[in-house]
Image: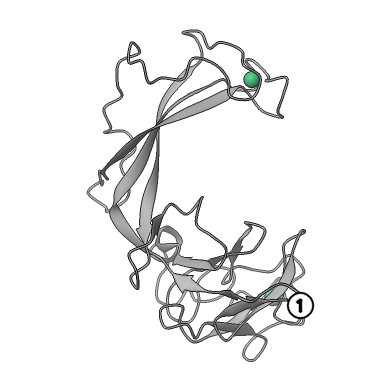
């Protein structure tokens, strides 16, 4: 049995980490060492996030450093092939999140197991009536995601792959109780639900539960 992992909440900040990324699309040049194209990134630090008027992250307004900037990766990190000018140039970024209790910061991609956040970009687009697994929104109007021990991002308010009521949009395949902010988040089948599973999550590599604020097997 694994040691229980405490579930904790991450809040978005107005800062992002940035990388200079070179890559090729696999249909243009397949990398011999991986199932997609060649790829390499160099981290260049943090910056303020730019937002659109609607409050979404504006990916188009960032100023890309000139191609002569020596921080651009020169070669694929997997196979070592040198990039040429025709390969893609990208200023890659990820929003930084923070844990309020101790100021711990991370992106969602490198958040450790137990991290929980609200996928507000899903939840904010729903109306007040759109609560249920069809809309991936829970009873509090949020769309919560929990990072599992294998790195899988569990969308707790989404429909389970083995849902037995695929035509019922209002129920929740996973019923959640409590809140991630105070360590009481709990997922089971007590509520308007279907017959799928026992409130557990099966990621393919990991099978477990979220009980009383902890991921457990
Ligand atoms: Zn490569
Ligand atoms: Zn269901």
Left or right of residue 77, residue 11 in this image: left
Whether 210 is drawn above or below 16: the answer is below
Left or right of residue 59, residue 29 in this image: right
Q: Residue at x 32, y 15 (%)?
A: 69
Q: Residue at x 57, y 86 (%)?
A: 212
Instruction: Indicate the position of residue 15 as horizontal and vertical percent values.
Output: 28, 49
Can I make out residue 94 in this image?
yes
Q: Circle 1 is placed at which residue position?
A: 196
Instruction: Indicate the position of residue 148 as horizontal and vertical percent values.
Output: 62, 64
Instruction: Indicate the position of residue 46 as horizontal and vertical percent values.
Output: 30, 41
- Is the residue marked 1 within 8 Å of ligand 2, measured from its CB? yes
Instruction: Indicate the position of residue 94 as horizontal and vertical percent values.
Output: 40, 45
Res. 59 image quadrant: top left
- The structure's colour scheme is one colour
User: Ligand 2 sits in which quadrant?
Assistant: bottom right
- Name the residue furthest bottom: 190
Whether 109 is drawn above or below 87: the answer is below
Q: Secondary structure at mark 1?
A: loop
Task: State which quarter of the image contains the N terminus.
Answer: bottom right
- Quick one: 145 or 151, which is closer to the camera? 151
Res. 72 image quadrant: top left
Whether 27 is drawn above or below 112: the answer is above
Task: State which quarter of the image contains the C terminus.
Answer: bottom right
- Quick one: 216 or 34, which is closer to the camera? 216
Left or right of residue 90, residue 134 in this image: right
Can I make out residue 172 in this image?
no
């Amino acid at each position: 049995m694994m040691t229980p992992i405490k579930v904790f909440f991450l809040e978005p900040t107005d800062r992002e980490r940035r990388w200079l990324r070179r890559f090729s699309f696999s249909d243009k040049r397949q990398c011999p060492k991986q199932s997609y194209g060649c790829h390499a990134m160099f981290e260049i630090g943090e910056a303020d996030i730019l937002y659109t008027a609607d409050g979404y992250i504006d990916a188009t307004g960032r100023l890309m450093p000139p191609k002569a900037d020596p921080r651009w990766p020169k070669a694929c990190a997997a196979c070592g092939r040198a990039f040429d000018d025709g390969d893609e140039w990208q200023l890659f970024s990820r929003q930084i999140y923070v844990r309020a209790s101790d100021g711990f910061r991370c992106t969602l991609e490198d958040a450790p197991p137990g991290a929980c956040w609200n996928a507000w970009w899903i939840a904010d687009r729903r109306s007040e009536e759109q609560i249920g697994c069809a809309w991936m929104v829970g009873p509090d109007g949020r769309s919560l995601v929990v990072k599992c021990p294998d790195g899988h991002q569990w969308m707790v308010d989404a429909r389970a792959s083995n849902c037995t009521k695929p035509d019922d949009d209002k129920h929740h395949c996973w019923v959640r109780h409590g809140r991630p902010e105070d360590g009481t988040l709990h997922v089971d089948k007590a509520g308007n639900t279907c017959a799928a599973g026992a409130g557990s999550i099966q990621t393919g590599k990991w099978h477990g539960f979220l009980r009383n604020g902890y991921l457990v097997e």
